[in-house]
């Protein structure tokens, strides 16, 4: 899997949008961008994924730049329960294992 | 079942003993993963099973670690002669085969192993 770079930590005020960046400058054409999060003491949870088009679901939106070298996960109205470690992963369907990096610790404060 | 089930949820053992951790994936999921997460650390890939293909064992840290999977169902992770550094949460995940969703993993709640 291509390497990703994320800031180690971010803060966000409750009710505001949380924008989590991810750089993946070595991404190849058949690799998707996946986002997961891990709330303390729980297993990771899938959030969203995309190839080149922007994606939205009930949890978040994913914005991928046109050159696909970076992406942003957007939580439109962050709540205290969104405090977690957020992982950006680049993965190809032709690969086997999926590798997690260190992620971004997002802290949502009142 | 509805989700990935792992057992035991907690295991305390003495150094040098063997332990077995079990994972029941979501029915119909052909891919199964094991990860290790030490306290305050990220997820460390251990092993990956996909259908009848040879498993990817590249993440197993030593020959004390082994895993088996029966067909496309239950998997067991075995740690022999446990050491204190084996203390961690062991996470299992499964996913379905094919298409753009093979990176969508469903995780269990993990088995917390403490080696005294």
Image (spheres, rainbow, N blue to C red):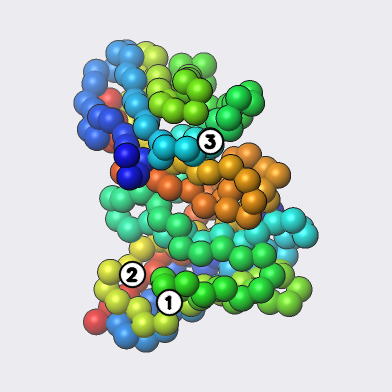
The residues tagged by marks 2 and 1 sit, at their Cα atoms, a distance apart of 9 Å
Q: Is residue A109 left or right of residue A69?
A: left
- In the rendered image, residue B26, in percent from the top left (x then y), is placed at 41, 40
Residue holding disc 3: B30
Residue at the bottom extreme, as displayed = A16
Residue A82 image label:
2
For the question of whether residue A13 can be seen, the reply is no
Chain designation of label 3: B
Instruction: Describe the element under mark 3 as helix, strand or loop.
Output: loop
Foreground pick, B46 / B73: B73
Labels 1 and 3 positioned on one and the same chain: no
- In the rendered image, residue A67, in percent from the top left (x then y), is placed at 76, 73
- In the rendered image, residue A3, in percent from the top left (x then y), is placed at 66, 55
Chain designation of label 1: A
- In the rendered image, residue A16, in percent from the top left (x then y), is placed at 37, 86
Residue A75 image label:
1
Foreground pick, A4 / A35: A35
């Amino acid at each position: 899997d291509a390497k990703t770079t994320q800031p180690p930590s971010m803060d966000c005020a409750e009710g505001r949008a949380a924008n989590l960046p991810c750089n993946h400058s070595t991404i190849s054409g058949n690799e998707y961008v996946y986002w997961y999060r891990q709330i303390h003491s729980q297993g990771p949870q899938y959030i969203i994924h995309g190839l080149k088009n922007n994606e939205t679901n009930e949890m978040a939106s994913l914005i991928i730049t046109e050159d696909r070298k970076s992406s942003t996960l957007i939580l439109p109205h962050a709540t205290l329960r969104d405090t977690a470690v957020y992982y950006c992963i680049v993965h190809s369907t032709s690969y086997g294992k999926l590798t997690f990096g260190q992620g971004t610790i997002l802290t949502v404060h009142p | 079942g509805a989700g990935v089930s792992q057992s035991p949820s907690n295991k305390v053992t003495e150094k040098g003993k063997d332990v077995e951790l079990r994972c029941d994936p979501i029915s119909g999921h052909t891919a199964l993963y094991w990860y290790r997460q030490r306290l305050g650390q990220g997820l460390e890939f251990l092993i990956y099973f996909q259908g009848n293909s040879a498993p990817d064992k590249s993440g197993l840290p030593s020959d004390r670690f082994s895993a088996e999977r029966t067909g496309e169902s239950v998997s067991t992770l075995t740690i022999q002669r446990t050491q204190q550094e084996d203390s961690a949460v062991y996470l299992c995940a499964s996913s379905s085969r094919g298409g753009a969703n093979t990176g969508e993993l469903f995780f269990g709640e993990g088995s917390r192993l403490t080696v005294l």
